[in-house]
Image (tube, helix red, strand yellow):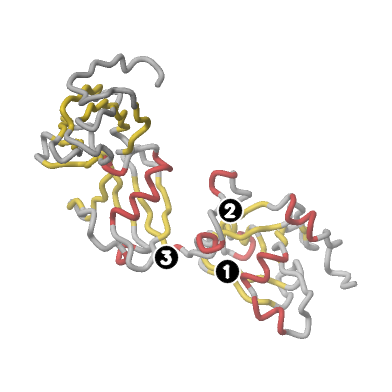
Amino acid sequence: MDPDLPPEQHPRLQLDGAQWFEVVYSKVFIKKAPHKNARSWGWVHKGQKIQVAPVRAVDADGREWVELTFVQLARSCPERLSSDDPLGRGFAMIDGQHLDLGRLLSGPLPPEEWPDGTEEAQCTDEERVTLRRLSGEKLSVQVQPGDLAGALLQRVSSQVATPVARLRLVVNGSVLAMNAPVSSLAGKEVDLVVVPAAQRAVTGGEDGSVKFWDLEGLMCVGTLEGHRGAVWTLAADLPAKLALSGSADTSLMLWDLDRLECIRSFEGHDGAVCSVAADFSRKW
């Protein structure tokens, strides 16, 4: 056993207690042992997130290092598997202030900041766009080849708990259209703004559809389909984002105007439904 290496954890223990760190320096070397003069397997880049064992290694100078899990080492340094030491281990220094480098790794990250899959973990800062909110909060989001603004906002929507329809990207003072390409934004910071709820209306049509309208923008923001006959009557609670429609097909349908989908349908009439009234304060 190499005397410079700390005791090695069993791979299962590594993964069971694994933590994540983010690379915050431009390039951080992965060393074969936890000391600065050790040989390198390779390196990781700023913005990438690395999975590490729960136990820190400490070098002779008292500096802390993380040990990459065997899974992470295979991702970050695949050439190791074809080297003369395919079972070698990998370590990264956490803080390089004594080398005038500053902080190298940030972590351990809270679970909500863990990457969603390998692709996101390997994504560097140059492959992400940073979204600034008016609150000062910043979100880092991966930009994929061919991405449009709408697809990017779809990934952000759950993080900010806001429907995509109310999110906008602002670049140099201009609002990007939902079908605008965003690949050129990688590595940059742009503004993410939330549009206040606008005046809305709901209508039913002879074609069986229910339409949700933005009265300020004079545009349809959603078409709800499901009825097999003309929609003859509607009731809606716009603050609650619910609508109930009655149709010539004898059915009623309850709609979620936020997700633009049917929550529930009601059958039982023998003829067309010509009038509805609803207490939307009750749980459906």
Residue type at the position of mark 3? Glu
Q: Is residue 200 visible?
A: no
At mark 1, the secondary structure is strand
- Kindly check if marks 3 and 2 are in contact, taking CB atoms under 8 A apart as contact: no
Residue for badge 2: 106
At mark 2, the secondary structure is strand
Residue type at the position of mark 2? Ser
**Precedes in sequence: disc 3 or disc 2:** 2
How far apart are the alpha carbons under marks 3 and 1? 14 Å
Q: Position of residue 105 (x, y in %)?
A: 59, 57
> Tag 3: Cα neighbours inside 10 Å, few (<14), some, or many (≥20)?
many
Residue type at the position of mark 1? Val
Q: Nearer the viewer, mark 1 or mark 2?
A: 1
Q: Position of residue 26 (x, y in %)?
A: 51, 67
How far apart are the alpha carbons under marks 1 and 2? 13 Å
Residue for badge 1: 44
